[in-house]
């Protein structure tokens, strides 16, 4: 057993069994209505994994659900990126995450192996890491840094009533990312995660729906059945590091024509689904989960969560009820009867320091990420290896998904700036020009990621350049949007019905 493996085991054995739960958003749908409906149906949830939210909202949640086991799904920690501090205040974001972990009393921090910022370019949704050796080394080094900072700022406890201040913080979990039509690199997903886990004692979140997108968009569906693909994947993936499993919905993206086909493909190929938490969970994912849970390599599984943020409450309740019937007994098999290492104190953090900085320079990797951004924004055709040598669905991202992301996702531009957009229309300036403007040049802001506020600032800048006569109008609309956004984020306690 290596020092890295020993350190991981020391950390993971402290985490109690979480069971079958839900990964949820504080705001949408109403979390307390959801909990109430689950209780009315007699559905016991093992835990709730909470997405990053305003601290005041998390404080309310902790007070309202004092006995619930809560976990934490982080956002904005770009561990896949070289020199992440240039993209956002990485250490400040880690400290904010530590505070939210403390509020929730979470045993882990989960983050996607993906980023919404790369090489100075900002996106609205996640793009997976480059699956290369250099990228794995950088990712491992950044995770080691993150874990060390968490250890210093928020020593974890053994359950709700265990030891404090033992120098071991909540465990960093790296989640397998989805492919949104394409992926890049010369390693497959299992090889990449093996390299990361060989270099740092992190845990892993295995997302079933994300794994289906790997099957779909690397061309594996042409070569073998889903069952055969999954069996081969599980035999090579570091399953011994899997601490949590996620399962969420899949759906066609609204911007992509449902009948889109690549010339020459057979008529019965897999649908062009992507990760969609608000969509129903297809039966094939439940079958995949059953296959995963039967694998003997799962040595440290602590929880299985349905990701249901943005999903209607009736659908959540029905899906969770079905999951309880099918999987609760399987999840119970992983219950840890003893927190074997709970009285062990770490005598050295040498294991974390073994994640050396990558052999390939950060500059070279940054250039590769810049090429990545150019390819997915349509400004370059090639220059990176493609996962499975299958880029057939890339045009769906470039021509449909990405424009929708900038113009519609997280705030529709025409609804945000109605008067300004009418002025642009009268002047014959199409909104598509805003998409090209957005990605015209890299901009490493070093500021906390907030896509809505960034969209406001970028649109004002765009209008200033293409239609100066509408500057007063766009600035007036921008002020109104910022004020409304600030007000919406302030009265958190009231919006969560604290006194209900």
Image: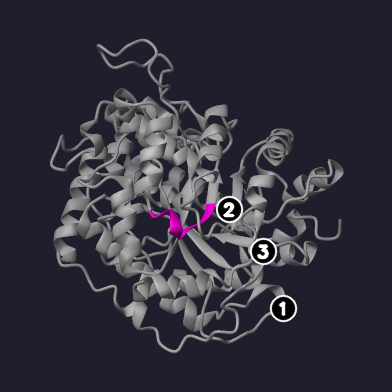
The quarter of the image holding the C terminus is bottom right
Task: Please name the residue that numbered disc 2 is placed on.
Answer: 485
Residue drawn at 37 percent across, 30 percent down? 216
Q: Residue 161 has which mark?
A: 1
Query: Percent position (x, y) of residue 423?
Result: 41, 32
Could you say which quadrant of the image residue 215 lies in? Answer: top left
Q: Residues within 10 Å of mark 2 (few under 14, many from 20)?
A: few
Look at discs 2 and 3 and give the one toward the viewer: 3
Residue extent of the magenta highlight: 238-244
Q: Quadrant of residue 334?
A: bottom right
| Residue 440 in view here | no
Q: Earlier in the sequence, mark 2 or mark 3?
A: 3
Cα separation between marks 1 and 3? 20 Å
Residue 47 image position (x, y, % from top left): 68, 56
Residue 459 location in percent, x, y?
Answer: 39, 45
Indicate which disc residue 58 carries: 3
Q: Secondary structure at mark 2?
A: helix
Distance, label 1 to label 2, CA atoms, is 38 Å
Q: Is residue 311 left or right of residue 169?
A: right
Question: Quadrant of the image for the N terminus?
Answer: bottom left
Q: Earlier in the sequence, mark 1 or mark 3?
A: 3
Regarding mark 3 in the picture, which secondary structure is present there? Answer: helix
């Amino acid at each position: 057993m290596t020092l890295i493996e020993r350190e991981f085991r020391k950390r993971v054995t402290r985490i109690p069994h979480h069971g079958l739960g839900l990964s949820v958003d504080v705001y949408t749908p109403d979390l307390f209505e959801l909990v109430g409906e689950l209780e009315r149906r007699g559905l016991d949830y093992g835990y709730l994994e909470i997405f990053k939210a305003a601290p005041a909202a998390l404080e309310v949640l902790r007070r309202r659900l004092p006995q619930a086991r809560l976990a934490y799904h982080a956002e904005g920690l770009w561990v896949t990126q070289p020199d992440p501090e240039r993209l956002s205040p990485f250490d400040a974001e880690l400290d904010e995450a530590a505070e939210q972990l403390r509020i929730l009393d979470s045993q882990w921090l989960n983050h996607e192996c993906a980023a919404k910022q790369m090489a100075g370019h900002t996106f609205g949704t996640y793009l997976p890491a480059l699956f290369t050796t250099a990228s794995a080394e950088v990712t491992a080094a950044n995770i080691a840094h993150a874990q060390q900072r968490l250890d210093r700022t928020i020593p974890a406890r053994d359950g709700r009533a265990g030891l404090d201040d033992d120098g071991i913080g909540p465990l960093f979990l790296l989640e397998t990312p989805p492919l949104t039509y394409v992926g890049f690199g010369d390693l497959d997903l299992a090889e990449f995660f093996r390299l990361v886990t060989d270099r740092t004692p992190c845990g892993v979140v295995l997302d079933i729906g994300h794994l289906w997108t790997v099957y779909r968009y690397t061309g594996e569906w042409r070569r073998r059945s889903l069952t055969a693909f999954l069996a081969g994947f599980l035999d090579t993936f570091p399953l011994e590091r899997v601490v949590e499993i996620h399962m969420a919905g899949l759906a066609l993206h609204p911007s992509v024509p449902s009948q889109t086909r690549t010339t020459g493909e057979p008529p019965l190929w897999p649908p062009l689904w992507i990760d969609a938490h608000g969509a129903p969970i297809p039966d094939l994912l439940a079958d995949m989960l059953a296959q995963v849970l039967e694998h003997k390599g799962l040595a440290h599984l602590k929880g299985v969560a349905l990701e249901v943020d943005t999903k209607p409450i009736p659908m959540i309740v029905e899906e969770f009820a079905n999951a309880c019937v099918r999987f609760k007994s399987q999840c119970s098999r992983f219950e840890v009867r003893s927190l074997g290492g709970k009285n062990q104190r770490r005598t050295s953090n040498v294991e974390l320091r073994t994640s050396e900085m990558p052999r390939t320079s950060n500059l070279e990797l940054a250039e590769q990420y810049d090429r990545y951004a150019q390819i997915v924004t349509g400004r370059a055709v090639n220059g990176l290896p493609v996962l499975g040598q299958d880029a057939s669905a890339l045009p769906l991202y470039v021509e449909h998904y990405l424009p929708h992301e900038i113009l519609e996702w997280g705030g529709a531009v025409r609804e945000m700036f109605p008067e300004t957009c009418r002025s642009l229309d009268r002047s014959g300036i199409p909104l598509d020009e805003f998409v090209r403007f957005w990605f015209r040049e890299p901009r490493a802001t070093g500021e906390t990621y907030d896509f809505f506020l960034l969209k406001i600032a970028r649109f004002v800048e765009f209008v200033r350049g293409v239609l100066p006569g509408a500057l007063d109008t766009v600035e007036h609309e921008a002020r109104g949007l910022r004020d409304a956004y600030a007000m919406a984020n302030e009265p958190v306690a009231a919006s969560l019905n604290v006194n209900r």
